[in-house]
Amino acid sequence: MPSPIVPTLKYNDAAAAIEWLCKAFGFKQHLVVPGENHKIDHAQLTYRDGMIMLGSVRNTELDGLQKLPSAVGGVCTQSAYVVVNDVDAHHARAVAAGAKVVMPPTDQDYGGRHYSCYDLEGHLWHFGSYNPWAEPSA
C-alpha cells in the first residue's frame, strides 16, 4: 500500500520545480493541474510508493499558513526523508541537476547511508538507504 502520509510544498515557480524534482531526484509526474498566469494549481509527484503534492504560491488562506524558506530567512521547519536504493548514485544525479548539498553521503551509526540537500527554492531534503519500514515497531 502506498504511504498515507503525503508532504505538501509551495514553490514560486512550481512548473520549474516539477521539472527539476523529476530530473534531480527521480520523481515522476502523477498529476499536474495548470492554473492561470503560468501557475500550477496542484501537482502530485510520485517516488516509488510515496507521493508529494505541490503548487504555486498564491494569495490563499493556506498560503498564509505555509511559507517558502526564502520568506522566513532560508530556514526550514520541516523536511522530507526519502528512502533510496543507491545513495551515491542518487547524490550524483542531484548534484548534476544543481542541488546544493549540505551533508554529503555518509555512513550512519544507526545503519544505512544518507545525504541532505536543498532544492532549487530552498526546501531541505534527506535521502538515505536506512528504511524505517524495515525496523520492528516499538
Image (tube, rainbow, N blue to C red):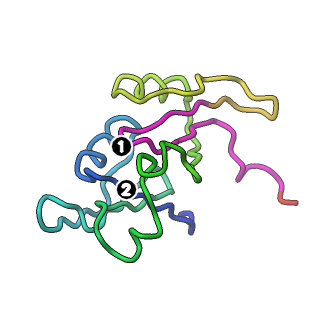
Q: Residue at x 39, y 40 (%)?
A: 26
Residue 119 percent across, percent down from the top left: 41, 39
Crowd class of label 1 (few under 14; some 14 to 19; many from 20; radius 10 Å): some
Q: Is residue 65 magenta?
A: no
Query: Of the numbered discs in the image, which one, if any, rests on residue 100?
Result: none
Name the residue that disc number 2 marks: 45
Q: How many marks?
A: 2
The magenta span reads 115-136
- In the image: residue 68, left or right of residue 81: left
Query: On the image, which quarter does residue 44 sit in?
Result: bottom left
Pinpoint residue 11: horizontal percent, then vertical percent.
Answer: 33, 53
Residue 25 location (% of width, % of height): 41, 38
Task: Check the image and name the residue furthest to the right.
Answer: 138
How crowded pointer 2 is (Cα within 10 Å; few <14, some 14-19, many 20+) is rated as some
Q: Residue at x 25, y 62 (%)?
A: 32
State the residue in front, 137 or 63: 63
Seen in the picture, residue 58 relative to 80 is either above or below; the reply is below
In the figure, 96 relative to 12: above or below? above
N-terminal label among 2 and 1: 1
Q: Amino acid at mark 2?
A: Leu
Residue 122 included in the magenta stretch of the image: yes
Element assignment for label 2: strand
Q: Could you tell me residue 90's position as x and y percent?
A: 48, 30
